[in-house]
């Protein structure tokens, strides 16, 4: 049975227009004015509301084993929470431990994700290097629909990728038509600053941002971008949180480099005063990396989004409850890093972005969905309202208000970094694979209904870069 959305205004990255949308067999079958209602179709009244492509959160960590524990939000609860906020697809991260097989880790994550209720895809982290990693990257791209690889420049002694790994992996990614992505923080600096702070008696959560100042991010962003420049590869910076790293992205883009930048909803809205809260649980609940930044950085990030220098918004959804955060009660370096937000990303961005005039509605769609689909090569299957696209849609009530709280959210975590924020504009309905899965505050999800989305290599911008490379080849790098 199909679903017909009647009387709404379709809003895409390009335009807004009055249209009904008919979904059948999981796809968008018709888009047009005053469509006939097919016999038996479920009718959703979207009068006075906007119909937009479902959100894509390109950066989540469901049930991630990390820092001696496992993230509390699993693929079932996490994708359900996403749907409750209008996010219909996530791109999560497979993170193999160093010296372990990328392929085995990929299969492990695929198994964990079987319970997802919305569609999902995977980036795979490169945490070490040898010939098997080179080979596994090829298998992942050519046989398993992975077209992006992640590099943590922080987390020394654990999953940190040093320059040797970065250079080898970026080189290999180019051959395969895959996009290298980086968590840009200088792991050595963080490591040494953490030791110094602990030795000086700063053991509480206030030490976390002190150990990861903006320069730490600016240095790593510059290094990753310059490595990509020398190798003539594209590069995507996850969670750009500071003026310093944003500046590197802008500089490189102005010089013609194909650099993409992501910003987290949290980094746009929360500042570092949260770490001064004398209640350990509250301060620790905000411990994530990169940390929330001093006032002033948020405005710069908004301008980054407005100018198009930052293209995507994400959450880095990685939840740990208070009992897990307590692992770092006497040592802030042991507080599991991570915060939630997959459920709230779209509404906080609408409220603080569209309602204030920082973003148009079309720009909102671009930065919450379409750009991620294009950069990670899922477009127009995802991120568009077009015949044949996946029927992943959100119906947005611009007048509905709600106050965000951990007491009422669907996320499996006991804290919400947007606690108490009243937003105007939220999802009234979410459609996933052509089914109404969220309606008026209630979820109607089916465990395991989410599908793994294969993403082909060689996104369109690879052709453009190849032309540049032909005129000016990169420095040859011997593996
Ligand atoms: N940062 C976090 O805060 N959590 C997970 C991984 C990361 O890079
Ligand atoms: Zn990160
Ligand atoms: Zn992350």
Image (cartoon, rainbow, N blue to C red):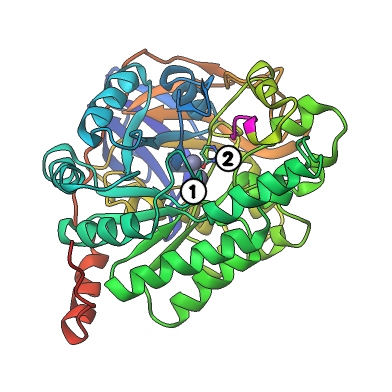
User: Looking at the image, which residue sits at the far bottom?
Assistant: 471
Residue at 40% over, 58% down = 236
Q: Position of residue 292 (x, y in %)?
A: 69, 48
- Nearer the observer, 274 or 344: 274
On whether residue 397 falls in the magenta region, the answer is no
- Nearer the observer, 184 or 454: 184
Q: Position of residue 401 (x, y in %)?
A: 71, 33
Are discs 2 and 1 less than 8 Å apart at CB? yes
Name the quadrant containing residue 388: top left
- The magenta region covers 334-338
Left or right for 359, reference 31 = right
Give the numbered dot on residue 347.
none
Would residue 401 be visible to someone looking at this image?
no
Would residue 429 be visible to someone looking at this image?
yes
Secondary structure beneath label 1: helix
Q: Position of residue 363 (x, y in %)?
A: 52, 59
Left or right for 123, reference 443 = left
Q: Which residue is mark 2?
A: 345
Secondary structure beneath label 2: helix
Position of 318 relative to 229 (above/below): above
Left or right for 278, reference 76 = right
- Nearer the observer, 114 or 237: 237
Q: Which residue is mark 1?
A: 368
> Where, quadrant-wise, is the C terminus in this rendering?
bottom left
Residue at 72% over, 31% down = 284
Question: What separation in Å lies between label 2 and label 1 (alpha carbons)?
Answer: 8 Å
């Amino acid at each position: 049975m199909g679903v017909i959305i009647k009387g709404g205004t379709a809003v895409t990255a390009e335009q807004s227009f009055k249209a009904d949308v008919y979904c059948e067999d999981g796809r968008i079958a018709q888009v047009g004015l005053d469509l006939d209602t097919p016999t038996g179709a479920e009718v959703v009244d979207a009068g006075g509301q906007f119909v937009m492509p479902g959100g894509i959160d390109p950066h989540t960590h469901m049930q991630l084993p990390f820092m001696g524990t496992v993230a509390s939000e699993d693929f079932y609860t996490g994708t359900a929470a996403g749907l409750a906020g209008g996010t219909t697809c996530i791109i999560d991260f497979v993170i193999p431990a160093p010296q372990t097989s990328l392929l085995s880790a990929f299969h492990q994550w695929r198994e964990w994700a079987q319970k997802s209720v919305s569609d999902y895809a995977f980036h795979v982290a490169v945490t070490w290097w040898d010939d098997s990693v080179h080979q596994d990257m090829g298998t992942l791209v050519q046989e398993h629909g992975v077209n992006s690889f992640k590099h943590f420049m922080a987390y020394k002694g654990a999953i940190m990728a040093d320059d040797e790994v970065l250079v080898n992996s970026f080189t290999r990614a180019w051959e395969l038509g895959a996009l290298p992505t980086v968590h840009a923080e200088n792991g050595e600096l963080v490591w040494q600053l953490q030791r110094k702070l602990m030795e000086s008696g700063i053991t509480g959560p206030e030490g976390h941002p002190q150990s990861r100042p903006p320069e730490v991010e600016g240095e790593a962003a510059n290094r990753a971008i310059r490595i990509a420049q020398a190798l003539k590869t594209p590069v995507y910076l996850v969670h750009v949180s500071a003026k310093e790293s944003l500046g590197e992205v802008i500089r490189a883009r102005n010089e013609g480099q194909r650099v993409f930048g992501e910003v987290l909803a949290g980094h746009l809205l929360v500042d570092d005063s949260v770490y001064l809260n004398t209640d350990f649980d509250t301060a620790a609940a905000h411990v994530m990396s990169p940390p929330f930044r001093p006032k002033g950085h948020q405005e710069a990030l908004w301008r980054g989004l407005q100018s198009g220098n930052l293209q995507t918004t994400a959450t880095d959804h990685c939840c740990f409850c208070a009992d897990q955060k307590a692992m770092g009660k006497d040592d802030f370096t042991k507080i599991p890093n991570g915060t939630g937000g997959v459920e709230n990303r779209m509404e906080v961005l609408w409220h603080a972005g569209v309602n204030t005039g920082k973003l148009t509605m079309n720009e909102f769609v671009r930065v919450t969905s379409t750009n991620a689909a294009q950069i990670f090569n899922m477009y127009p299957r995802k991120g568009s309202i077009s015949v044949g696209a996946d029927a992943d849609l959100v119906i947005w009530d611009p007048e509905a208000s709600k106050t965000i709280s951990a007491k009422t959210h669907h996320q499996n975590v006991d804290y919400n970094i947007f606690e108490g924020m009243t937003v105007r504009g939220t999802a009234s309905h979410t459609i996933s694979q052509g089914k109404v899965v969220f309606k008026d505050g209630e979820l109607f999800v089916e465990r395991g209904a989410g599908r793994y989305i294969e993403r082909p290599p060689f996104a369109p911008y690879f052709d453009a870069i190849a032309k540049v490379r032909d005129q000016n080849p990169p420095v040859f790098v011997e593996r």
